[in-house]
Image (tube, rainbow, N blue to C red):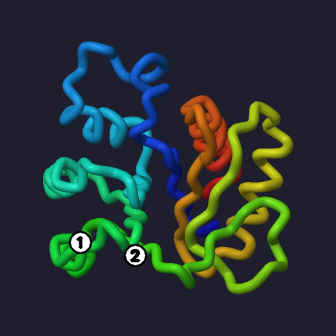
Amino acid sequence: MKAVHFGIRQRLSPALESTFFDPEMPAEWRVAFLLNEQDALWVGRDDDDVDTVLAELTDAPSPVVVVVDETRWSPAWEWLAQDGFHRVIRLQDGTAIWRPGEEGAGRAATVGLVPANADAGQLSAWLKAFVGQCPEQGALFVDGEPPSMATVERLQTLAELMGT
């Protein structure tokens, strides 16, 4: 099976400060802490910690799939992509994003979004559908507010059981 990487889309959500991160943890440590729990990172149009993310990725011991909104793109991302250790996906207006229920809606996608969900059967079906349409290794993000690290963990477990 193809490799699938997992993360949360709203990694800067205030809800994570009370449910996932230690409230005493400095903001600049949160990217590194998050990368201990997931191997995909979303840099959205409103994310103001791009320099911290780039610094943490430069020192990251393991490869990460990074999805970067076009509004946050810079030569530094280009350099990181060309370095080849991390997979960097530039999210532009025409970039295909897979979502449950939109399986036949267009081109194959290497980036997917799923809502938080506790139903292992549903998550398994979504994971199989995403992997089935993905042309290469992909990144599947849990979307929604508040972010659900529990859903990320369930997806990671299912992927291990499926052999992805």
- Amino acid on which the number 2 mark rests in the picture: Arg
**Where does the image place residue 139, in percent across and percent down from the top left?**
53, 61
Circle on res. 90 = 2
Which one is in front, 39 or 55?
A: 55
Q: Residues within 10 Å of mark 1 (few under 14, many from 20)?
A: some
Which one is in front, 163 or 79?
A: 79
Circle on res. 77 = 1
- Tell me which residue sits at (43%, 41%) in the image: 11
Which one is in front, 60 or 74?
A: 74
Instruction: Identify the image quadrant of residue 42.
Output: bottom left
Q: Secondary structure at mark 2?
A: strand
In this picture, is 20 found above or below 141? above
Q: For the residues labelled 1 and 2, say whether their Cβ atoms are less than 8 Å apart.
A: yes
In this picture, is 113 found above or below 110? above
**Where does the image place residue 48, in percent across and percent down from the top left?**
27, 50
Classify residue 119 as left or right of residue 45: right
- Tell me which residue sits at (55%, 80%) in the image: 95
**Where does the image place residue 131, in percent across and percent down from the top left?**
68, 67
Q: Secondary structure at mark 1?
A: helix
Instruction: Identify the image quadrant of residue 84.
Output: bottom left
Circle on res. 162 = none
The numbered mark, 1 or 2, whose residue comes first in the sequence reads: 1
Instruction: Identify the image quadrant of residue 148.
Output: top right
Classify residue 130 as left or right of residue 31: right
Residue 48 shows up from this direction: yes
- Tell me which residue sits at (76%, 31%) in the image: 118
- Tell me which residue sits at (49%, 44%) in the image: 10
- Amino acid on which the number 1 mark rests in the picture: Trp
Quadrant placement of the N terminus: bottom right
Which one is in front, 49 or 121?
A: 49
Q: Distance between the Cα atoms at labels 1 and 2?
A: 9 Å
Classify residue 110 as left or right of residue 46: right
